[in-house]
Amino acid sequence: MIGLLHQMGKQARKAANELRKTKTAKKNEALLAMEQVLYKNEKQIIDANQQDIQNAQANGLPTPMIERLTLNSDRIKGMADSIHQIAQLADPVGYIEEMITSEDGLKIGKQRVPLGVIGIIYESRPNVTADAAALCFKSGNAVILRGGKEALHSNKAILAALQEALVSVGLSEDTIQLITDPSRELAAEFMRMNEYLDCLIPRGGAGLIQNVLKNATVPVIETGVGNCHLYVDEAADLKMATRILVNAKADRPSVCNAIENLVIHEAVSEEFLPVFADALKEHHIEIRGDEKTQALVPEVIAVEAEDYNTEFLDTVLAVKVVKDYGEAISHIQEHSTGHSEVIVTDNYQTAQEFLEDIDAAAVYVNASSRFTDGGCFGLGGEIGISTQKLHARGPMGLKELTSYKYIIFGEGQIRGTTGAEY
């Protein structure tokens, strides 16, 4: 199987070389074909997804993970809509960001180019197969995907649709490939395919991401772990805070941009705690709080120290009451994973300080963290949320999947004197 994996790498490299020269119009034609084939193959995709769901239930997969795994007509439409939006976006490939003339008269430009071949390792969300493939494709990259074994049938059905679309417009199906063997041995080899992969992107929980970071020799873009906080300031509109909190925690608890930690200024805790507790009770959210929280809401479970470091991806929320803004910032800085952090306040100065004090990929004032998403940011979709600082940070759209090269135009200039006699 390792031999087959290396063959996939060779095919991807060849496809990437061809795709790099493919014009934007042809890429958009392929993307629109992908959109239509997803609709055409909807029944096959949902049938395949039902196999995965049945297997997941038989294997005791937690309910939030099954929710992430599930596909239906609405979610397939969401996948198709995302691909359609990507087709409408400007193509970054070939764009010259700047052009200068040097002292030697050279015209030096900085031009956007694809990364080349991208490897993506992800877990149970099969919509990632379509989103990641489309973004890589539009930005001129071939991609090799390795999804979780729990979504294997779904991913194969989605891949078949995408490859059908590529072939229908005369492009290589090797532009988008899927590893179907879920073995750890193969995953480890995939992480070391420096000869073929230019970049590796893990998308999933902390365990997956740390495993890739520790074992990969291919350059890695770290994405996704979201221990996100919402801080309710003493000057907060508490009705607004409740609305934002319910959305950020209860809308989709299993995603990385959901709130996991609630931090409350003690000046508003007595009024706010019972209100938000009642609101979250309707959504069956388990609240784990410190002593001050438990004193005000007796049904709250005692929080453990490790809860403040945990990305639950579940219907669980950790709560801490703080004496002032400074303690709130210290708590967030200690436990944040640098994904998305939120403050609710009507104090302009406090809001500005929060924006300066918090070092995260996305920092919000009076809005839900659920907006940390490539589609919401106008990127048409995303390959993941980068929580690192090198190359790309935040939602990774088309531009973040490119690099650049310098292009230089001369009129016979040479450096120094060697060759001047010719």
Image (tube, rainbow, N blue to C red):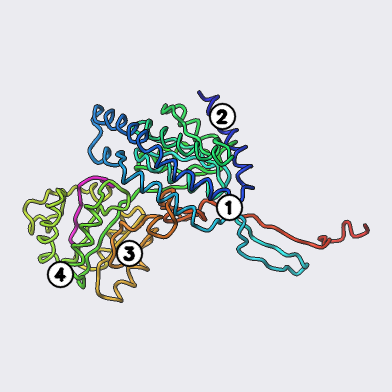
Q: Which residue is mark 2?
A: 6
Q: Secondary structure at mark 3?
A: strand
Residue 139 placement, left or right of 280: right
| Nearest to viewer (mark 1 / mark 4) | 1
Query: Distance from label 2 to label 4 (Cα)?
Result: 61 Å
Percent of width and height locating residue 323:
19, 66
Q: Which residues are magenta?
A: 311-322
Q: Secondary structure at mark 1?
A: helix
| Nearest to viewer (mark 2 / mark 4) | 2
Q: Which residue is mark 4?
A: 267
Q: Which residue is mark 3?
A: 364
Residue at point 55% right, 31% down? 8
Residue 63 placement, left or right of 373: left
Query: Distance from label 3 to label 2 (Cα)?
Result: 44 Å
* Amino acid type at mark 1: Thr
Residue at point 17% right, 68% down? 238
* Nearest to N terminus: mark 1 or mark 4: 1
Residue 314 lies in the magenta-colored region: yes
* Nearest to N terminus: mark 2 or mark 1: 2
* Amino acid type at mark 4: Ala
| Nearest to viewer (mark 3 / mark 4) | 3
* Amino acid type at mark 3: Tyr
* Amino acid type at mark 2: His
Percent of width and height locating residue 71:
31, 40
